[in-house]
């Protein structure tokens, strides 16, 4: 007897859909989500109360994970795809430095252990 419940039907569709997505698209999608979340935590959203969203501890975590993803993915996805991810990461690292009232030492900012110091 097959379980034809709506939940299983949708789960099967999602599995089938993800199987058709190239790895580069999955990597880019994850990176963009991390970038967007970090930007919000840095107060860079377009909302009128963006300053209330600032959470540097959360931003540091997101940027560090993004740095890990970009660093690990770069050899797999090639420079053409990695360059915009590195640029976005660097912008977030610089924004973090600007937002932080207590500056990190060079090489100690979010993700800099993986990317090197950002100035």
Image (spheres, rainbow, N blue to C red):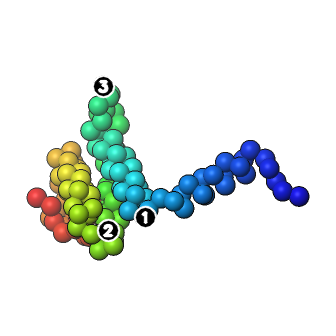
The answer to whether the residues at label 1 and label 2 have Cβ atoms under 8 Å apart is: yes
Q: Is residue 34 above or below residue 41?
A: below
Q: Residue at x 54, y 62 (%)?
A: 19
Q: Which residue is mark 2?
A: 77
User: Looking at the image, which residue sits at the far front?
Assistant: 20
Visible in this render: residue 102? no
Q: Residue at x 36, y 57 (%)?
A: 28
Q: Residue at x 16, y 65 (%)?
A: 117
Report x, y in % for residue 46: 29, 31
Report x, y in % for residue 43: 28, 38
Q: In the displayed structure, does residue 26 sit left or right of residue 51?
A: right
Q: Which residue is mark 1?
A: 23
Give the Cα separation between the discs numbered 3 and 1. Answer: 36 Å
Label placed on residue 48: 3
Which comes before the other along the chain, label 3 or label 1?
Answer: 1
Helix, strand or loop at label 2? It is helix
The answer to whether the residues at label 3 and label 1 have Cβ atoms under 8 Å apart is: no
Image quadrant containing the C terminus: bottom left
User: Looking at the image, which residue sits at the far right?
Assistant: 1
Frontmost residue, 118 versus 28: 28
């Amino acid at each position: 007897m097959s379980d034809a419940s709506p939940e299983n039907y949708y789960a099967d569709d999602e599995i089938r859909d993800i199987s058709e997505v190239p790895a580069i698209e999955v990597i880019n999608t994850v990176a963009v989500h991390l970038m967007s979340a970090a930007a919000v935590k840095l107060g860079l959203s377009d909302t009128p109360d963006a300053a209330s969203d600032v959470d540097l501890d959360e931003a540091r975590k997101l940027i560090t994970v993004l740095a890990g993803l970009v660093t690990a993915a770069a050899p797999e996805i090639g420079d053409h795809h990695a360059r915009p991810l590195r640029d976005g990461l660097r912008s977030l690292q610089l924004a973090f430095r600007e937002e932080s009232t207590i500056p990190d030492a060079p090489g100690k900012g979010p993700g800099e252990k993986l990317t090197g110091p950002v100035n």
